[in-house]
Amino acid sequence: MESCYYETIQETGHLQARFEPVISPARVFPAHWHEYVEILYIREGSLSAIVQASEYDLSAGDLMIINSGDLHMTRTGGSHYLILQISARQLRAYLPDFDRLRFTTVIHPSEVADSSPLFALFHQMEELFQTQPPYYELLFASRLYEFLYILCRDHSTITGSAITADNDRDRLRITRVMEWIRSHYQENLTLDAAASLLAVSREYFCRLFKKYTGQTFLEYLNDVRTMHLSKDLLTCDDTITSLMEKHGLTNYKIFLRTFRKLYGTSPQKFRQAAIGDGV
């Protein structure tokens, strides 16, 4: 599976998790899911997200927890955040009920009791990561597991199997379409063909896809095509027109708007910047 709808974790050094600061320009991360828990702490700016068909708006100081398997998309107008990712495999080793455990999606500082060290522990992990004193990995792991303990104790629920099955069913239906788009994006894909794939009406498909991805079918298709084209911009000298034809993009204005939405610049400047950086 490719990252256009599914992601795998890349751990940071010996931390048994991914932890790093991110300064993101204005961009959209199209709908995807992953088999790890992802936690975002907003340092500056704002971020909006659609997670399992629910909409959220985050600002500085907020925590967002994406549960393993949740279909989600995010949009930022420019923000600085910290990202923490822990694999489902690792969490299952400590949490027998992990597959039925659901963390609260958004935690605002005002909603946390003064006695809770939740945010303080996250700041301590950040300081350890930035300074990296000798043997800091051990202390980082200690803070990480205490942070996860508080999340489990105060900000989680155990779901029933019926709810989990419903979530899995909806996610699998949408990701089936996303996989089809990934495999055939260079072809002339149509909305009617996508609806037929799930054996539902065109109208119902549009509502379902929009509900769970935050995008229309055509918006998502153009995102996938544009992301593939952006890779070619970095690896070959073909003209943008020929790359558009290769990746199934036929409308330049729509392509340019999509590219700016995803990368915050024009394809020409994107390529020039890569050449300047020696990519």
Image (tube, grey):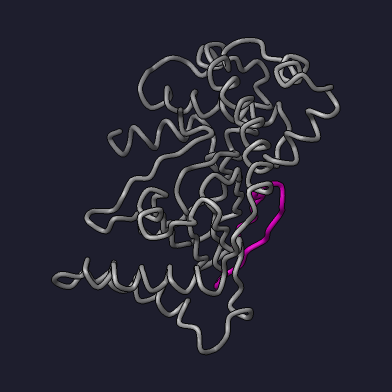
User: Where residue 180 appears, x then y in whole percent?
Assistant: 59, 19
In this rendering, the count of numbered labels is 0
Residue 189 or 159: which is nearer the viewer?
159
Q: Residue at x 31, y 39 (%)?
A: 277
* Placement of 226 over or under 261, stated as above or below: above
Q: Is residue 56 magenta?
A: yes
Front-lying residue, 156 or 55:
156
Location of residue 109 by image quarter? bottom right
Image-based side of 182 in relation to 279, left or right: right
Q: Quadrant of residue 247?
A: top right
Q: Is residue 198 left or right of residue 34?
A: right
Looking at the picture, does residue 52 appear above or below residue 237?
below
Q: Quadrant of the C terminus?
A: top left
**Which residue is at 70% across, 41% downward?**
212
Q: Position of residue 205 (x, y in %)?
A: 78, 28
Identity of the residue drawn at 55% across and 27% down: 226
Location of residue 9 in the rendering, given as x and y in whole percent from the top left corner: 38, 45
- Bounds of the magenta segment: 46-62
Residue in the picture at 75% in, 16% down = 196
